[in-house]
Amino acid sequence: MSISLIKIHIKKILFSILLFSFAASAQAQSNEDKIKAYGIAKEAIAKMDNGEIDASIKLLEKAKKLDKKNYLYPYEIGYAYYLKKDYKSAITVLKEVIKFENNNDQCFTILGNIYDINGQPKKAIEVYKKGLLKFPSSGRLYYEMGNVEEVLENYNEALSSWEKGIKVSPTYPSNYHTAAIYYSQYTTEKIWGVLYGELFMNIERGSDKTSQLSKILYDTYQNSITISSKTEASVSFSKSNQISLPKDGEELKLPFSMPYEITMALAASNQLSNKTLGIKSFTEIRTSFINSWFDSEKNKKYPNLLFDWHKTLIDLGHFEAYNFWLFMKGDEQEFEKWLNKNQQKFDDFISWFTSNKMPISETYKFHSSQYN
């Protein structure tokens, strides 16, 4: 059992961001050497962008000598060696970079990634863990560590890492992406896959990964909701329905998956006349689910920001268009037919959607462990 590794490509700090950092350093430190270092580094980055890697390294070395406390110069030297595929030199330089007090999580990320590329995955994990001691809320480090654990076939550790990343850094999208694929395609707990997948699509809109998850969500709903006959509908988003007995004085609380599946099955029973399910069916099922969930006040017992988002979309009249956007890659023909009849409705939704992001934050977030 394995999912294909979805590696983040190591990216150089954007030129404009780097120059801003250098400029800020130069302004804060009016020392002439620091200003000279900034000018040299500016030239070095231009050469690096032009493919003149060796010349760039020489200039960065000069900048480094002029401003020894600035980690950005050796960071870029390490990145330049990476571009040359001189991983040994890159590692040597970046091992020093992670010792700087004023560095960031990207420094640990690039060193760990280079260790991994160099065939040293365990060293990579060591670096990520060291980075997390300093940057415990780094979703990026948890994401990269999960990817390496997945390659090592440590699947539980990989999933645990991605979910920790979701928990500590709820606005960082990549952990949702990998966790959603894993849960949807390789476990019986599709429930977390569809929730994480939809959250990802709201955080990272319009990318290739968004299109990929649109298809995965569609397929997962199709495989998890079954119309057995004209009198029977069933759902299977989860196989884990363990109930913990309450302690004295506590109220019995069912695991989230049980009321979720019961409510979803009742919502699906409205589709018994349909032989096949598609985007329209999923829209109607999900609308009925949310209305029932809130009418029965399950939202108070099992708070869920995604369901709150659905309720907002329903109240504003955008939920139909939202669902056709969400599932469009599952059946592009159905989407196009609907769009031809509902262009204005979709345009209105997109206009609103563009200006209104899901209100996810450090304090208002979703994670599977919140119901434990």
Image: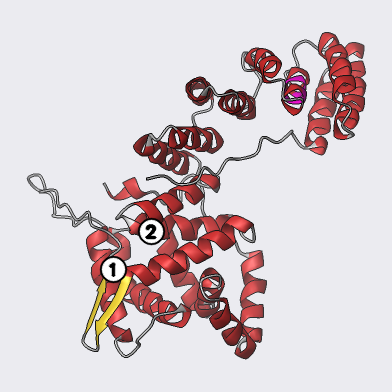
- SS for tag 2? loop
Q: On the image, numbered disc 1 is attached to which residue?
A: 297
On whether residue 314 falls in the magenta region, the answer is no
For disc 2, the neighbor class at 10 Å (few under 14, some 14 to 19, many from 20) is some
The residue shown at (85%, 25%) is: 53
Label 2 and label 1: CA atoms lie apart by: 12 Å
Dots 2 and 1: beta carbons under 8 Å?
Answer: no
Q: Which residues are magenta?
A: 76-80
> Which is closer to the viewer, label 2 or label 1?
2
The residue shown at (32%, 46%) is: 369
Residue in front for this viewpoint, 203 or 251: 203
Q: Quadrant of the N terminus?
A: top left
Quadrant of the rendered structure where residue 306 is?
bottom left
Residue in front for this viewpoint, 322 or 246: 322
- The numbered dot on residue 304 is 2
Q: Residue 85's x, y, as percent?
A: 72, 25
**Hey, what amino acid is under mark 1?**
Glu
- The numbered dot on residue 220 is none
With respect to residue 337, does 171 lie above or below?
A: above
